[in-house]
Image (cartoon, helix red, strand yellow):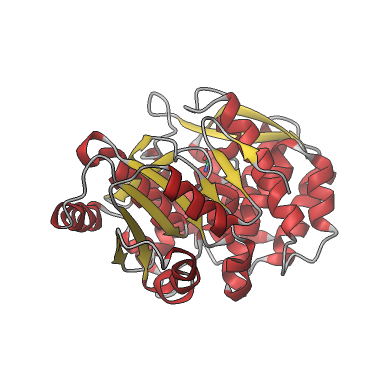
Amino acid sequence: MNTLNSISYPIYFENTLTELVKFINQGNYSRFFILTDENTGKYCLPIIRKHIDKLDNFDIIEINAGEESKNIDFCVGVWKMLIDFSADRQSLLINLGGGVISDLGGFVASTYKRGIDFVHVPTTLLSQVDASVGGKTGIDMDNIKNIIGTFTQPKAVFIEQSFLETLPARQILSGLAEMLKHGLICDASYWSQLKNSDLKKPSAELVYKSVEIKNKVVIEDPHEKGIRKSLNFGHTIGHAVETYSLVNDENPLTHGEAIAIGMICEARLSNIKIGLSDADLTEIYETINGLYPKYEIAETCYKTLYNIMLKDKKNQSGKINCTLLTSIGHCSIDNICTEDELCESLRYYSAL
Ligand code: GLY
């Protein structure tokens, strides 16, 4: 698999850990820091350590795993560690983990001393096919996802497939939602290929294809002024459901599980508002419902979900803005949706 070139950095798929060591050695860095959580510290760091053992100018910074860590308090913790370790502007931060580590680590690095270099070594399917590519960094605040952040590109991304082998099935499904989205928004043949594959264990070729699609979009529109909004399909309702679940459920939905719900609801919106055919809508919900568990959303929660959507950073002039589909493989950005329409789509999901 060829290395992909992104906006200003390479995305490696082969010999990734050797490439990482080469990158560190060539970078003239004074020190480097590896940001992990307790899972990646346990399962992935030992693999990396085998490759960097000969280097002695590094330290490990570990935070708690999970979306609950993606906030300013944990940033302060990491900034303090960097200060305590006397990290200078020639330092490098290696983000070893899933989306929380890459988003938070990227944000910490992009603001520490007005910005130090960082790279991502994504360890979940979700972060490999989505969070690690495109330069979005950020944290949550007041239960609003990614509301604080920057666009800052990493210096490189290293996609090591073997990290996926130990992931629980639920985490694979979480990343898969973004892969399905890639097919739905711009590549009908990739969508078909996914549907006909063993999705419990997506192949390296499928992961590569998803990264290729995402990379093409972000190169064209790094700051989400236009076509990058296509990547938000399923995310207006999905983020609201995810936030609601994080606050209210003992065992909250994963990002992908919430986005799967969002994609069904937003496919329904596409059907009623911009002519997505009944056949395409049926194909979408049958495929997604076949993969993801059903989540009960009581009618009494709709107002809360709507209020969460009103705070979405993608809104314009207080109006809720969705990316919708005109057909499988084609999307339309900037569709304003009303409260009634959004609620109807939630009702549609619940009735399936
Ligand atoms: N996760 C969507 C984007 O990177 O634009």
Please tell me which residue lies in front, 315 or 117: 117
Does residue 97 appear to the left or right of 288 in the view shown? Answer: left
Residue 14 seen: yes
Figure check: 302 above or below 217:
below
Which residue sits at x=39%, y=53%?
Answer: 94
Q: Quadrant of residue 26?
A: top left
Rendering coords of residue 3 (x, y %): 66, 43
Residue 343 seen: no
Rendering coords of residue 289 (x, y %): 71, 62
Which residue sits at x=40%, y=39%?
Answer: 312
Please tell me which residue lies in front, 338 or 260: 260
Rendering coords of residue 197 (x, y %): 82, 61
Figure check: 139 above or below 321:
below
Q: In which quarter of the image is residue 125?
A: bottom right
Which residue sits at x=54%, y=62%?
Answer: 124
Please tell me which residue lies in front, 145 or 44: 44
Does residue 166 appear to the left or right of 87 in the view shown? Answer: right
> Dividing the image into 4 quarters, which one contains the C terminus?
bottom right
